[in-house]
């Protein structure tokens, strides 16, 4: 009997170090488990490695991660075998080392050697199962190493869960901040037109004064404009609430793009005297399947934003065909938007500017635009350079998938 340590039979410290280093440096579970399973393969024999998670309420097992090295196996069959071991482990936390029937005539693939271990942490309940087809048996050293790995995986999963929770809290915090801003914005947005309407109406109704025709006209125009603002605000709030509850109905029909844009421009030129719009269309005969009313709402919103946030700038509207659809672009030469705001621009209630100094708005417009474009299976994106201007691009497929058509068949392209 030798008194010296047999290094072949002990786990090398640098292997343990490599495993724990790999786990401690990972922030994402998938690449971490990929690295780990690849590294493990260099020091531990296995054909399949499967991690099962267990639903604590129903005890149902689900495959969280699987890596198969062996060839010629049917992945589903391997997963099903391991499932039984995982189930037993979660019923009673234990290490299961199970050897197959060793009848010599059985094919290697019919002789799976299982090693199952619990992967239990404070927040996670699961099991890890290794399979070796045709052996060899798991040694004491293998079991120790696998136990170490299962503990490390539990730590990894815990850490990732904590990070996810941290991110969720941060997102919730950000949403609460937006909600608070929204409440102050909305009260301002509701009060200010109501204040004008009330003030000018009271003035007009004063019995001790008579107003000449032009003054009356001027006051009534202000009341009219402020009523429009209120109407727009209330429509946006209702649309946003409908979108949140999934109740905004999109009714598809074939829409000819050129008349839609011609109407949009004619309306905008009346509504915003002084606004110069330049339009460029690749073809006059493009039709898409869309909800004309909702699409018009999106386009109106982009025009009104250009007027509000890029005052005095010319607005260029172009349409081109691309990837089985069209891209409508709105470009202004206004002050632009700083890059740090761009990722949030389509978020509900997001506004770039100081609400107390900014033109009226609620941060709902672009959110609603994005939701409507999403419903069309399209995409809305923004490019902006401070001091140069902003471009919004809307991609819309000619025909969104699985949509039913209400309305007319499009005119044949000439
Ligand atoms: P609202 O106009 O009600 O604030 P939107 O969702 O329509 O809300 O727009 C969000 C923000 O995006 C606006 O507050 C504005 O700061 C910015 N924005 C939108 N369009 C433009 C544009 N063309 N140029 C510069 N900034 C813009």
Image (tube, grey):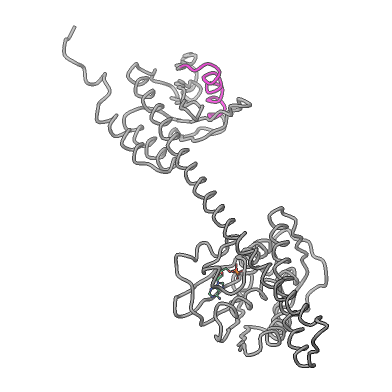
- Viewer-proximal residue among 343 and 82: 343
Magenta residue check for 306: no
Q: If the image is split into quadrants, where does the C terminus sit?
A: bottom right
Of 329 and 183, which appears nearest the observer? 183
Query: Is 366 in front, or is 373?
Result: 366
Q: Quadrant of residue 359?
A: bottom right
Q: Main secondary structure of the magenta part?
A: helix
Q: Which residues are magenta?
A: 78-94
Q: Residue at x 52, y 50 (%)?
A: 173
- Asked if residue 40 is positioned above or below residue 232 in the image, the reply reads above
Residue 176, given in percent of the width and then of the height, sits at 56, 52
**Which residue is at a point 62% across and 70% down the rendered structure image?**
361
Which quadrant of the figure shows ligand 1?
A: bottom right
Apparent side of residue 279 relative to residue 82 in the rendered image (left or right): right
Quarter of the picture containing the N terminus is top left
In percent of width and height, residue 310 lies at 54, 80
In-front residue for pair 226/321: 226
Name the residue furthest front.
208
Disc tally is: 0
> Residue 2 falls in which quadrant of the image?
top left
Question: Looking at the image, which residue is at 65% across and 62% down?
Answer: 371
Query: Where does the image place residue 275, in percent across and percent down from the top left?
Result: 62, 87
Magenta run includes residue 88: yes
Q: Is residue 345 above or below residue 149?
A: below
For residue 144, side relative to residue 114 (left or right): left
Quarter of the image where one finds residue 366: bottom right
Residue 37's x, y, as percent? 39, 35
């Amino acid at each position: 009997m030798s008194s010296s340590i047999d290094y072949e039979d002990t786990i090398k410290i640098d292997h343990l170090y490599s495993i724990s280093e790999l786990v401690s440096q990972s922030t994402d579970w998938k690449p971490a488990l990929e690295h780990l399973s690849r590294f493990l393969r260099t020091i531990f024999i296995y054909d399949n490695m499967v991690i099962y998670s267990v639903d604590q309420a129903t005890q149902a097992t689900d495959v969280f991660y699987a890596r198969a090295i062996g060839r010629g196996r049917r992945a589903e069959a391997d997963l099903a075998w391991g499932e039984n071991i995982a189930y037993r482990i979660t019923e009673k936390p234990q290490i299961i080392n199970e050897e197959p029937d060793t009848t010599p005539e059985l094919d290697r693939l019919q002789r799976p050697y299982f090693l199952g271990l619990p992967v239990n942490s404070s927040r996670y309940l699961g099991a890890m199962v290794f399979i070796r087809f045709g052996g060899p048996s798991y040694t004491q050293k293998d079991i120790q190493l696998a136990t170490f790995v299962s503990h490390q995986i539990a730590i990894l999963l815990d850490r990732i869960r904590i990070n996810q929770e941290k991110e969720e809290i941060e997102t919730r915090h950000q949403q609460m901040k937006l909600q608070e801003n929204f409440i102050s914005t909305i009260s301002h947005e509701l009060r200010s037109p109501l204040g004008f309407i009330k003030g000018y109406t009271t003035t007009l109704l004063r019995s001790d004064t008579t107003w000449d025709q032009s003054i009356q006209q001027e006051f009534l125009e202000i009341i009219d404009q402020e009523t429009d603002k209120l109407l727009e605000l209330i429509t946006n709030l209702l649309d946003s609430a409908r979108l949140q509850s999934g109740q905004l109905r999109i009714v598809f029909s074939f829409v000819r793009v050129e008349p839609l844009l011609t109407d949009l421009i004619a309306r905008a030129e009346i509504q915003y005297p002084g606004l110069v719009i330049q339009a460029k269309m690749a073809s006059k005969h493009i039709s898409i399947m869309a909800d004309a009313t909702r699409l018009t709402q999106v386009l109106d919103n982009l025009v009104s934003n250009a007027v509000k946030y890029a005052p005095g700038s010319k607005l260029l509207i172009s349409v081109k065909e691309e990837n089985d659809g069209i891209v409508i672009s709105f470009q202004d030469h206004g002050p632009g938007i700083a890059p740090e705001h761009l990722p949030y621009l389509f978020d509900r209630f997001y506004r770039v500017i100081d609400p107390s100094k900014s033109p009226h708005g609620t941060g709902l417009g672009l959110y609603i635009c994005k939701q409507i474009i999403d419903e069309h299976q399209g995409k809305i994106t923004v490019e902006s350079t401070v001091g140069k201007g902003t471009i919004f691009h809307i991609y819309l497929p000619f025909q969104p998938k699985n949509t039913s058509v209400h309305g007319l068949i499009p005119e044949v392209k000439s």
